[in-house]
Image: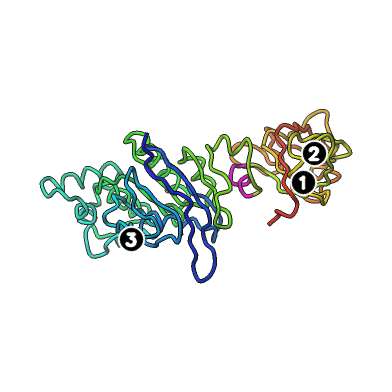
Amino acid sequence: MTVALSIEDVALRRGGRRVIEHVSLDIDPGECVVLAGESGSGKTSLLRLVAGFDRPERGAIRIGARLVDDAARCFVPPEARGLAMVFQDFALWPHLSVLENVALVIRERAGREKKALTLLEAFGVGACASRLPAMLSGGQQQRVGLARALAASPQLLMLDEPFSSLDVETRDALRTELRALVVETGLTALCVSHDPVDGQRLADRIAVLESGAISQYARPAAMFAAPASPYVARLAGLSGGVPVDARIANGNAIIALGGGDFCVRGVAGNIGDTGRALLFWQPDALGLADAGIPARCIEAHFDAGRWQALVRVDGVAAPMPISCVTRPSPGQVSVHVDPGGLHLFPAEMAR
């Protein structure tokens, strides 16, 4: 099967600094991939290479079966790549009405305005068709931007931080609408984001860029089960990042928590030579129980249907957040630890 997008060993240098190095990435037809990373990781630079706004110094980019850039003689300009792009700042033409913004990108003249209005109605902004963009809210403008992108019937939809300037409620609604659109139409999409929720709600797979290279490319569930770095662990929804003492025994890492030793299997190579490591845990790996390691609860707050307790455990300098069904009282508690949900990384990887 031909992939929808293929990025092969791409590199980019800007101002003498290596921005992207040895990046390879395939996206299947009908798949939504979220390109995640912190500011400066290279994610927008990679999106610009796919769009044709910049050129790589090495590697190749294919859209479908078509070579669009080989860093040498072959270069297909942006307007001929069959792409559509949705920007963070909406990028609507301010002097045109909402309907005109969408209709202008439809190539077939016959029925152009009718098709544009149908798309606007699908995104809930049909009633705004005669208005100028300045008369719309941010959420409405982004809906118009999505409608305009789809009006071009693209091979690949690209989104650059499309929800970051919106309020939380609008952001959630647009994520849901965009995910439904991708699934129901078979659209292929590449979305740049630093928001973990975008990966969890939108992505079939997540590609994580760190320092210009892909540190992990996997489905969200696989990333949660086996994160490749501290940043990936945070992105996937794990808690922690606290330094702990660790030692190696029989190829496994042993950490000390609350006076007890716990074996974290298969990660001996992740603790380096310092005897210290960064501990992350899945939400269900730590819990308050009738029996377990001794700890002290210092406070608890309510968050999205559950209580989050902050506890102090001997051997850990930082307080540890633990999810609870009921509100614990401050004071002595016991914490159950499931070693299978623990993850360790070298202490030098701390931010």
Q: Nearer the viewer, residue 55 or 320?
A: 55
> Which of labels 1 and 3 is toward the front?
1
Residue bounds of the magenta highlight: 231-237
Instruction: Give coordinates of residue 339: x percent, y percent.
Output: 75, 33
Residue picked out by circle 2: 253
**Residue 88 rendering spot, x and y as whole percentages:** 41, 57
282 on left or right of 215: right
Element at label 1: loop
Location of residue 293 by image quarter: top right
Q: Which mark is residue 91?
A: 3
Marks 1 and 2: in contact by CB < 8 Å? yes
Pinpoint residue 300: horizontal percent, then vertical percent: 72, 43
76 or 270, nearer to the observer: 76
x and y, in percent, of residue 24 in the image:
49, 48
Left/right placement of residue 266 relative to residue 135 reads: right
- Amino acid under disc 3: Ala
Q: Residue at x 54, y 61 (%)?
A: 40
Tell me the number on the disc at residue 271. Answer: 1
Q: Amino acid at mark 1?
A: Ile
Q: Amino acid at mark 2?
A: Ala
- The residue lying toward the viewer, choosing from 70 and 235, is 70
Q: Earlier in the sequence, mark 1 or mark 3?
A: 3
Residue farthest toward the left in the current orientation of the protein: 110
CA gap between label 1 and label 3 equals: 47 Å
Task: For mark 2, give the secondary structure.
Answer: strand
Which residue is found at the position 27% from the left and 64% from the top?
A: 94
Image quarter hosting the C terminus: bottom right
349 relative to 6 in the view: left or right = right
Task: Measure the C-alpha gap from mark 2 to mark 1.
Answer: 8 Å
